[in-house]
């Protein structure tokens, strides 16, 4: 009879441990998600706002939130770290002919042609 | 030109060393005028649209002999141009004045046949292969 309370206590402990396992997994997933989000955010212009969001719900919306709330002036701040792209543009000559390429290119190739 | 153009763009235009200018030659009557006018009116909205139209017009060359205003408006719209603005340009005469002025200028320059190519003053009559353009451009670049 003395064993009954002990068995009941053991049973309660087992139930309690079983209930904790998913919670631990969730906590682990949350940590991984947060790290991934932090790494991703650290390499993007939205890093300051993304790294301040440790919860699972917030990390899940890092991408869309950053995309929609990012100020329009964020891109130029990112540009200096990238290699400068050649200035390939479309425009018109002084006479009004259309050109493709850098306006100050050292060589000009004029194609006198008809679409027919 | 269209056959060699993609390679020239990759090798020279994208690196900023060459600029390609399309100069209209209206040697086939109204079909020449209207196709060039269509490209002009697309380009007035955005020069990039001119080059998009340029590619499509050459691809559909056979259709241009009988193409009408609606054909060109639909084409321009399919490329992203505003149809109403395009039609206003097509009908206004301003676009027509521009393309005929360019055609008059090429006659003053002594260009009578097409295609004709001018690479920094060196003129070639008729179609040229890529190697010809490459050699001429490389020589011009070496003189810079």
Image (spheres, helix red, strand yellow):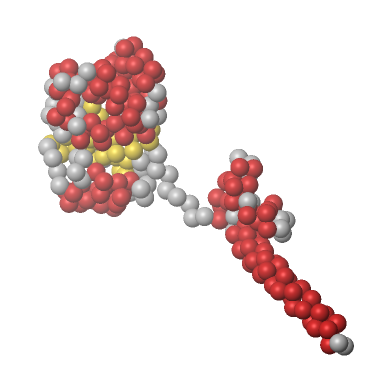
How far across and down, in percent of the image, does residue B128 sit?
14, 43
Instruction: Report whether residue B82 is seen.
Output: yes
**Quadrant into which the N terminus of chain B falls:** top left
Query: Which of these two is toward me, A106 or A65?
Result: A65
List x then y, in percent, for residue A76.
Answer: 58, 46
Give the residue at the far bottom of this rendering.
A2
Residue B51, relative to residue A6: is it above or below? Answer: above
Residue found at the very far front of the displayed protein: A1
Q: Picture coordinates of residue B45 (x, y %)?
A: 40, 25
> Does residue A35 appear anywhere in the picture?
no
* Left or right of residue A60: residue B110: left
In the image, what residue occupies the spot 64% across and 43% down? A69
Q: Nearer the viewer, residue A72 or B144?
A: A72
Q: Is residue A86 above or below residue B92?
A: below
Q: Is residue A101 shown left or right of residue B8?
A: right
Nearer to the camera, B131 or B64:
B64
In the orientation shown, which residue stands out farthest toward the right?
A: A2
Residue at 63% x, 54% y is A60
Q: Residue at x 19, y 43 (%)?
A: B3
Q: How many marks?
A: 0
Q: Residue at x 77, y 79 (%)?
A: A11
Q: Position of residue A10 (x, y in %)?
A: 79, 82
């Amino acid at each position: 009879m003395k064993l009954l309370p002990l068995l009941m206590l053991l049973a309660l402990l087992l139930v309690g441990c079983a209930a904790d396992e998913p919670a631990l997994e969730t906590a682990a997933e949350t940590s991984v998600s947060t790290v991934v989000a932090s790494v991703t955010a650290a390499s993007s212009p939205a890093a300051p706002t993304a790294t301040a969001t440790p919860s699972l719900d917030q990390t899940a919306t890092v991408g869309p939130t950053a995309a929609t709330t990012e100020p329009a002036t964020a891109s130029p701040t990112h540009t200096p770290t990238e290699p400068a792209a050649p200035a390939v543009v479309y425009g018109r000559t002084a006479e009004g002919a259309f050109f493709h390429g850098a306006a100050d290119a050292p060589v000009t190739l004029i194609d006198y042609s008809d679409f027919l | 030109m269209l056959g060699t153009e993609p390679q020239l763009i990759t090798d020279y235009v994208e690196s900023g060393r060459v600029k390609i200018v399309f100069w209209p030659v209206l040697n086939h009557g109204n079909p020449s005028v209207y196709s060039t006018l269509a490209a002009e009116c697309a380009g007035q909205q955005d020069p990039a649209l001119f080059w998009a139209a340029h590619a499509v017009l050459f691809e559909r060359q056979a259709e241009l002999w009988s193409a009408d205003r609606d054909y060109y408006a639909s084409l321009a719209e399919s490329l992203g141009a505003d149809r109403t603005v395009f039609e206003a340009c097509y009908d206004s005469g301003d676009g027509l004045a521009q393309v005929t002025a360019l055609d008059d200028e090429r006659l003053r320059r002594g260009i009578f046949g097409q295609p004709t190519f001018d690479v920094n003053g060196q003129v070639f009559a008729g179609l040229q292969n890529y190697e010809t353009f490459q050699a001429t451009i490389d020589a011009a670049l070496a003189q810079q």
